[in-house]
Amino acid sequence: MSNNREGTSRDLTRANTKAREKRRAEAEKGWRKNPIEKFASQKNKTRMDRDVKQLKGEVERFERYLLDEIAPESEVEIIGVRDAVREDIEEYRDEELKSDGNLGNSTIADYLAYLRQFYNILSEHNAFVGNPVKTPLQDFRNNHDLDVGRPYIPYNRMRAFLNWLTFPFSRAFWLAGLKHGTRMSETINIDLRCLHIDHPVFWEIIDNHDVQLDPRIRDLPDTILIYEGFNKGAEIPNEDTPGPETEGEIRDKAQGNKRSEEGGSTLPLDSEFKTALIDWLMVRPPTYGQSVNPLFVVGGSRTVRRAGDVTIQKKLWRKQSYADSILHFAVEEEISECPTCGGSVVEENPSSGDKTGRRFRCRNCRQNHWRSIYWDTDLDTAQKMGFHVARHYFTNLHDPGKTDLHDGAIPDKVRKKRIRGDSEQNGDTEDNTYKDKSYESYDADVREPYLDGIAKFDIYDEVIPAVGEGWEQ
């Protein structure tokens, strides 16, 4: 039997056959029409799912910035990532990534490297010419220290910052990180049904909003629930009205939750955090008629909505025009003379040493004066105070081996697994296999050791006592 197909003839002098050229053209067309999806599909063949999601997510983040921030100001039409030029990458690096207080220099370099990888692959598939990320990434690496740790913040300076805050929203949001090590996305995703606060103001708000407390905290006064892990875009069902027709909420205001603890984390409230939450709830705009009632909301009248990560970053970090932004605090906290002797001061930024925080040294009495916050992303060292620093600060404040910041300590098992929501990393078979949460006494095993060690920032002259702290349940 002949292998020749009837009616088929080929010019063997050609480097490429017509069939190959057509097939290649179709493949290139696919990369040009759907570059991000094609990129993710190719990476799925060699990378783990979570790695591909991160790669794709960072490319999508850049595309959102390109379309939302750059395109409206451009004289030419920009419809996607294939329209980007080097100046777009530089603006994205400087205005989006470097101004994100939760990103260290090494992480910013990684995110830019993801984009460089994306455009390299597009170039390989004839869907893009050149790579607009190469120079902006190289410039960033040349001008920033990628290995520096997070800023050192003395305990009294953190207290000064928290007392400086003006609005109940800001105090309650910051304390979520400083009291529990909660991530920003996890804090954004807290709902009213995740709270159980033993106080008349709370019960009135819950009744007015017709909210049913989550069963996991219903019998535990002065506690808060942090949802278990889920990805951005997941639908969280509305437990207030269970049933097949339950309307949930697509969680797209943050990057999702990363809790390793199955079923989420039930965390005790101390008197200071409880007072801050009641303070916020008293001025929180109502969300009547919404199927899901977020704890942290913004807007007014008919536009009340869950606060998103971009809104939070603007209010608490990026914009000097916001009263409680760190950028505003950094300007107000400038030291022009020595608080001790009134002498002139020189500002120091040690690029090495045990403590990489911002400080001033008096030329006269030689005293050092620490600043708790500094916001300048062009420094060689990472001097950013973002929300993720609060998570690290919680750990260092309460680590039994690091009591120089705070006299109290919370046992590792409670602090790491039950409060921070970390996974067990010591490989202990007994812990991973045999210990059952149902044998746990919440009050004796979690609440008591937590309240015994939790740090106080002296924000209020009088606090509302919490269960287990100042009065008996």
Image: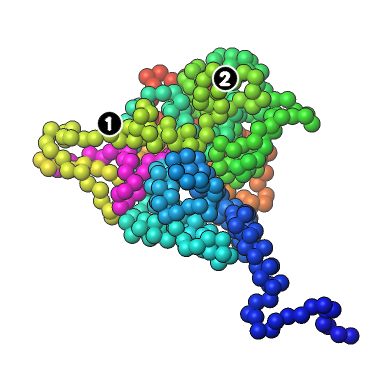
Q: Nearer the viewer, residue 303 or 246?
A: 303
Residue 392 magenta-highlighted: yes
Amino acid type, label 1: Glu
Q: Quadrant of the C terminus?
A: top right
Foreground of the two, 241 or 435: 241
- Of the numbered discs 1 and 2, the one sitting upstream in the chain is 2
Residue found 50% across the figure and 37% down from its top: 309
Crowdedness of circle 1 by 10 Å Cα count: few (<14), some, many (20+)? few
Q: Which quadrant of the view contains residue 23? A: bottom right
Total number of numbered labels?
A: 2
Query: Hey, which residue is sitting farthest right in the picture?
Result: 1
Left or right of 340 in this view: 353: right
Instruction: Specify whether 435 is left or right of 190.
Output: right
Using a 10 Å C-alpha cutoff, classify the residue at mark 2 as few (fewer than 14 neighbours), some (14 to 19) or many (20 or more): few
**What residue is rendered at 63% in x and 80% in y?**
15
Picture quadrant where residue 33 is located? bottom right
Please name the residue that numbered disc 1 is placed on: 332
- Who's the residue at 43% across and 50% down the image? 88
Query: Is residue 73 in view from this perspective?
Result: yes
* Magenta region includes residue 143: no
List x then y, in percent, for residue 335.
21, 35
Give the residue at x 74% y 29%. 246
The answer to the question of whether label 1 and label 2 lie on touching residues, with beta carbons closer than 8 A, is: no
The image quadrant that residue 357 belongs to is top left
Badge 2 is on which residue?
Answer: 302
Q: Position of residue 40 (x, y in %)?
A: 61, 57
- The magenta segment is 365-394
